[in-house]
Structure formats: structure tokens, C-alpha cells
Amino acid sequence: MPGGGVAPVVITGTADTSRLEAPITMRAYLICAFAAFGGIFFGYDTGWMGGVLAMKYFIRQYTGLPYPDPNDAAAVKAFHLPASDQSLTTSILSCGTFFGALIAGDIADFVGRRTTIISGCFIFSVGCILETASTGLGVMCAGRVICGLGVGFISAIVILYMSEIAPKAVRGAVVAGYQFCITIGILLANCVVYATQNRDDTGSYRIPIAVQFLWAIILAIGLFILPESPRYFVKKGKLESAALALSKVRGQPIDSDFIQDELAEIIANHEYELQIIPQTTWLGSWTNCFSGNITNGNSNIRRTVVGILMQMMQQLTGINFIFYFGTVFFTSLGTIKNPFLISLITTLVNVCSTPISFWTVERFGRRKILIIGGTGMIIMQFIVGIIGVTAGKSSRHDSAAVSAMIAFICFNISFFAASWGPCAWVVVGEIFPLPIRSRGVGISTSSNWFWNCIIAVITPYLVGTNKGDANLGAKVFFLWGSLCCVSTAYAYFLVPETKGLSLEQVDKMMEETNARHSAAWKPHSTFAEEMGLTHKGLALDVAPEDVHTAVVEKVAV
């Protein structure tokens, strides 16, 4: 029998809500830290695209325009990619990621979280080959769609995987590490772009693109070594494999009380959820994500709507405008001598600010820092807009005002990096019950990419200077500030506090209270106690198809 000495172990749970996880080990930190490396993909792509779009050689190759005479102001102003090309090149990746994230949920339930992420790395590499080889818009766009599929796989399932293996006491902090890796990816891309911007050959853009191969290789090789999510094995009914995986993640022997208590709670919660969310056909499993009443805080549709809106609101803060189009925007102001350097500075601010969330997300909770961070962003963006339409206008030639604009843009980035950036991923990974978790996270992540695509499509036209473009300039920050008001109100009314709770306890909390009172909720029972696994144990060698029957028998007894 597989497992050898594992088979005789009988899993029993506990009624003690404080004993559901083992003490945190360095192994748990390292596993989660490596999984967070998947954020490099998202961040690096954001960073290199924003810089490449403003490269002189890239513009000449993709438009056919000759290099302008520096003394010809009209030629200098006209030397850029049309807004339509900027929009298409940037947004087309998000089309791929939208579908990739949706598909990834199904695949993760079928073959596992690790295998799905590894598959995403392979797909991403294929797209990266096309991007690197491109000399025109057609091949570049094809490569970006394929890259997008891979990034969709990775972005959705890395969050799912990290949420399922991270210890509850530091889950927010380690999942926030995903956002930190995004910021590092943006910074690395800007560094590479800054180094190659003046090359007068295809290496100017091919080198930044080709560096992405390294991230795919590192993540794919590492995930061959890491354990699979124990919650995936419980979902598949493979209790022996779940126990072994949990033992590796927690650094405890398989027969320890910690492993027994946590595994029993995962099993009991899954069985409890199956009573509420019956597993039916493939289509039925998708419709389960939208079942229930929207006014019920614990309904599946409420969770799905919260997840979708969480990612939507993150994008509507306007942060990706700065990273996708920052270099182009700073160039269009006409008052900044080195837009590439300013973009590099903004990405450095992003990297340095994100680690603040490692502490605040566990000290103050997700909900509170979303509200505080959103309020800070509102203030900063309106200040940027006000300066931009007064003393910061290019006609004023007021370098002090321009410097102030850049400073407040950096403050805005700091608020995002310490709040909305990490918390959006943390909350989405926590709010879904196991039977629909992979699809729920996939749907929420696809929402991120859908709105990312919308922002990428419309922004070049909002700040473009050609005929027919809105040419808002710094006034675009009034738009982002107004949308931040909506995001902050959403956080106040709809986002629950999940700090310090296991994923199973989050389910219980959402059953018993609403978002505004969630911070005061405390665990008072365990699913293992309710499902009869505290005294009547469950053997690990139960066949997958018999797990449900075995648990039902315990409840009956």
C-alpha cells in the first residue's frame, strides 16, 4: 500500500480553536517566498512594456518614422507610437491573461496547483519567444496573447497555492510577498530598459523581453521540488497524500497532533461545504460560484462578487497607468528631461513601500489598511491633478511644481504599495470555500486582467496628444482620484476582516457576521467538532471515493 507506515495513522480533530496549526517554521516561510516569485512575471511585463513604448529605436521600427531633428519641436512631438498601437500592444496581453485565469481554475482542480503553474511557465516561454523575435505589431501581439495565457495561469494559481499552504498567523504577510515580487519585477524591468534605451538596434527591446525566460525557468524548476497543496489532495479525497504534503509544509511528523488537528479541520470543513455546495456536473460546478442570495454575506455569489470587485477596484485606483504609461506620460508633459529616470524612481518607491504591508496587514488587518490606503490615494491624486492644471503646466516652466507633482505621485504609489496592492491578492485568496476556491480565485483574477485590459485600452487616448485624443495630461489624476473614492467605499461596506483566521474559520466568520463587524468576530468552535472527527477518527487509507461516506458515518455516530 502506498505510504507504508502512514496507512495505520488515524486522523482525529480538536475542539480547541487555538490548536489548528503547527508553530511557524523557516521551511513554511521559504516555500511561500519561493511561490511568491510568480509575481515577477506580472511585474516585469508591466515594467518593460512601459519603457519599450518610449524607446526611439522601437518607435522608428514600428512606425517607420525617421529620428527627429532635436531642434524641430513639431517632429519631436510627433515622434511616438500612435495611441491605437500603444493601446493594442499593452492591452492584448490582458486578453490572454483573462482567459488564462479562467481556465486555470479548472486545470488546478484536475492536475493540481503545482502542475498548473509549471504549465503556465511553459506557455509563457512560447509567447516570450514570439515577442523577442518580433519586428512588427503582428508577431508582437501574437506573442503577448500567448504570454498572457501563461501569466493568467501563474497569477491565479500562485495566489491560490500560497493561500492554501501559508500559516494563518502570517498568511497575509506571505501572500503580500506576491505583490512585493510584482514590484521587484517592475523595478528589474525598468533597470534593464534604462540600460538598453539608447541602443540603436533590436537589442534595445529584445534584451528586456528575453530576460523573462529566466523567471520562467526558475519558477518551473522550483515548483518541481515544492509540495502540492494539502487542500487540493483533500478535495480529491487523497488523505494520505494530503497528510504527507501538510507534513512537509508545516515541518512536523505526519502523526503529530498539529498535523492531525489541521488535516481533520480541512477535511471536516470540506465535507461541511459539500453539504451546502453539492458537486455536480462541470457546468454545475461553475454555476455554484454564483448560487445563493447576493444579500447573504456567506452566499457563493456574494463571495464571488466581493472577489471580482476587489480586483476591479485595485485596477481602478489607476496605479497601472503610472507603470504602463509612466514613461510616455512623463515625456508628454514636456517638462521632464529624463522620463526613463523618473519612471525608475517611481518603481523604486513601489519596491521600498511594499514591505511595509508585511507588518501592517497582520498588525492592523486587511480591511483597515484598505480604507486608510484608499483615503491616502484620494488625497495624493487630487493634489497631483491640482498642481498639474495650475503651476505644473508646461507653459509655466515651473520646475519646482513639476518636482512636487512627481513627489505626490510617489506618495500615491507608497499608499497603494502598502495597502491595496497586497491586500487585493490576500483577500481574494481567503474568502472562497474549498469546493469552489480554485474557480473563485480564477474568476476574481480574470476580473483583475479584464479591468487591466480596459485601463490599457483607454489610457493612451485619455492622455494622448494626437487629434481626437482627450489630451487630459495631469487632469487624468482627477479621474483616478474619483475612482479611488469608489474603491474606498467598497472596502468599507463589503470587504470582511480575515486577519488571524484559518481558511476554514473565514468560512465560519462569513456565515455569522457582516463585513463591517467582521473584525470583532472570534472563533468559537471547529468544523472537526461539528462533523464528529474529534473523538471518532478517520483512517488515512480511506479510498478517495469513500471519504465522504466515512465522514458521514462519523457524523451519524
Image: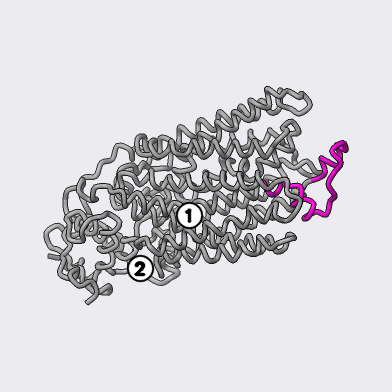
Residue toward you, 266 or 518: 266
Q: Residue at x 20, y 66 (%)?
A: 551
Q: Is residue 553 magenta?
A: no
Instruction: Answer above or below: position of 359 versus 544.
Output: above
Q: Are marks 1 and 2 in contact (CB under 8 Å)?
A: no
Position of the N terminus, as image quadrant, is: bottom left
Q: Is residue 65 magenta?
A: yes
Q: What range of the chain is rendered magenta?
A: 51-79
Q: Which residue is mark 2?
A: 279
382 on left or right of 253? right
Instruction: Answer above or below: position of 46 versus 547.
Output: above
Residue 168 in the image, given as x and y percentages of width and height: 31, 47
Amino acid at dot 2: Gln
Amino acid at dot 1: Gly
Q: Which mark is residue 38?
A: 1
CA separation in Å, label 1 and label 2: 30 Å
Position of the C terminus, as image quadrant, is: bottom left
Q: Quadrant of residue 464?
A: top right
Residue toward you, 148 or 315: 148
Question: Visible in this render: residue 163?
Answer: no
- Label 1 sits on a secondary structure element that is helix
Q: Which mark is residue 231?
A: none
| Number of marks in the rendered image | 2
Q: Residue at x 25, y 41 (%)?
A: 522
Q: Residue at x 48, y 47 (%)?
A: 181
Residue 198 in the image, given as x and y percentages of width and height: 73, 45
Residue 330 in the image, given as x and y percentages of width and height: 69, 37
- Label 2 sits on a secondary structure element that is loop
Question: Visible in this render: residue 507?
Answer: yes
